[in-house]
Image (tube, rainbow, N blue to C red):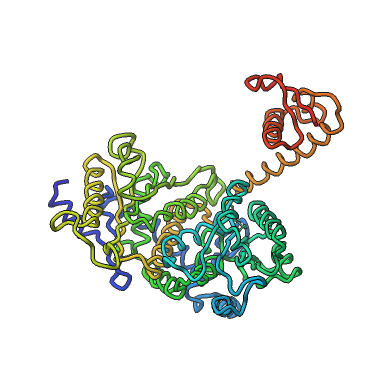
Amino acid sequence: MDAITLWQRYQDWLYYHEEIGLYLDISRIRFDQAFLEAMKPKFDGAFRDMEALEGGAIANPDEQRMVGHYWLRNPELAPTPQIKQQIIDTVNKIETFVAKVHKGEIKPPQAEKFTDLLSIGIGGSALGPQFVADALAPDYPLINIHFIDNSDPDGIDRILQRLGDRLKSTLILVISKSGGTPEPRNGMMEVKQALLNQNLHFRDQAIATTQIGSKLYQEATSQGWLETFPMEDWIGGRTSEMSAVGLLPAALQGIDIHALLQGAKTMDIATRQPDIKTNPAALLALSWYAVGGGRGQKDMVILPYKDRLILLSRYLQQLVMESLGKEKDLEGNIVNQGISVYGNKGSTDQHAYVQQLRDGVPNFFATFIEVLRDRQKPSPEIEPGVTAGDYLSGFLQGTREALYDNQRDSITVTITEVNPYTVGALVALYERAVSLYASLVNINAYHQPGVEAGKKAAAQVLELQHQGLQVLRGHSQGISISDLAAKIDAQEQVETLYKILRHLAANDRGVELSGDPSKPAQLIAKWR
Ligand SMILES: O=P(O)(O)OC[C@H]1O[C@](O)(CO)[C@@H](O)[C@@H]1O
């Protein structure tokens, strides 16, 4: 297409939301009118599915759950008065609690006020709060946030070290919908210990966001933690940013949660339109389908040209990949669906992997996120008449054009500035696009059976460790790894057993491995 035809295509397909100040440009996705016509029946079905979902249908058939994240920003939509009230009550509870913390009415026993917030959670119980904190927290927030989102001891140490003496004025927030996920549990246990080492008590500084009745809930209430906040059954982890999961840490940092909710609500209204061309989420879903043939054949590379949006790609990675990456469709056919998502930020990535994007394997499409306002204050000139922001804008445009010229498609989402309102709108835009796309490809976007398989496998590894150590401890002589495996009837897991022993040996956990490390089958294990 020549430049003038492309300019016309840009205008023909441009979506603009005046109130949010958001532009969506899908003109650099190659599809034609025939494709659009062919997709219309599928979209009619997707719009119907969305209406049913918002009306309270069991949209997650496997788990027999309603899917209600859209109600969080507009409680009027909730299917029952009780749910509506729960949503309103939770926001009120958050605001009351946060106000007391900020005023020092809720305070740690050994300090005037809470100075820091340590959020312990993983997946959907971390990624939204991390993204929002990085994008929106003021430079000098009322409370500084830190995260433990893994079971990595060294990672935990780094956070605790940074907190140092401020641990005594740190509010500890454990977020886990199920209340039984091992990683946050491990983080919590380590932090408990760290507090005890300073003669501090976890319950005096701890709060939880979890489902009422969960193990975590029981622990928090029976031990008298400062407060608990509910996460409802009908909220999925990866769509929980507008629930207590996201709102509580945001409010504690001084981020305007009402603007966040309002931005999402406004976007929800726009994405509820049952018309492809005037619905930005439908335009995104249409584009994803067009580039990937409805089979996720191309990866989604997210490139925000704005440092404070760097975590958007990680946030969207879970939202998109955990929602769309499914083995089976709704009828149980094997379909192996999904769209891979990765990214970082521009223009930084132009000096890293954009070389391959431009010239290498064409297995992706880019999504540029553009922010029109460079900064809050006027910019100095780097050269006569040119600012750093002009460069950034030029790099974005140049990369978009260079990619398109080489048959690489892209989408551009443009917002005026990064603020709670626009971030809320972005979150809602992608939530809805994922929902619509899931309907187009006929999968359940709201379960995650694959993750469960990984969790079970990890539990089996730990059980093997337990059994192996029991035998090793009672064995005064050294023993080969295969003999040890035979003794616990785990010949098939000999490789796993070897790796367990190697890990224990590396951590001075009582296991000694002797022999040539490059010949694992010949290693002798011994308890010392
Ligand atoms: O909040 P929970 O129950 O600890 O779960 C954390 C995460 O684990 C998953 O269930 C699976 O990875 C995610 O969907 C979820 O966000």
Tell me if 262 is positioned left or right of 114 in this view: left
Q: Where residue 296 sits in the image (x, y, percent)?
A: 42, 44
Viewer-closest of 71 and 103: 103
Residue 401 versus residue 133 in the image, above or below: above
Residue 145 versus residue 361 in the image, above or below: below
Viewer-closest of 255 and 103: 103
Question: Which quadrant of the structure image shows residue 283?
Answer: bottom left
Quadrant where ligand 1 appears: bottom right
Residue 198 versus residue 250 in the image, above or below: above
Residue 63 versus residue 289 in the image, above or below: below
Viewer-closest of 397 and 406: 397
Q: Residue at x 75, y 32 (%)?
A: 511
Q: Residue at x 50, y 43 (%)?
A: 335
Q: Where residue 162 sits in the image (x, y, percent)?
A: 55, 55
- Most distant residue in the front direction: 165
Question: Which quadrant of the structure image shows residue 365?
Answer: top left
Tell me if 341 is positioned left or right of 328 in this view: left
Viewer-closest of 57 and 201: 201
One can see residue 273 in this view: no
Q: Residue at x 73, y 66 (%)?
A: 218
Q: Where residue 366 sits in the image (x, y, percent)?
A: 33, 48
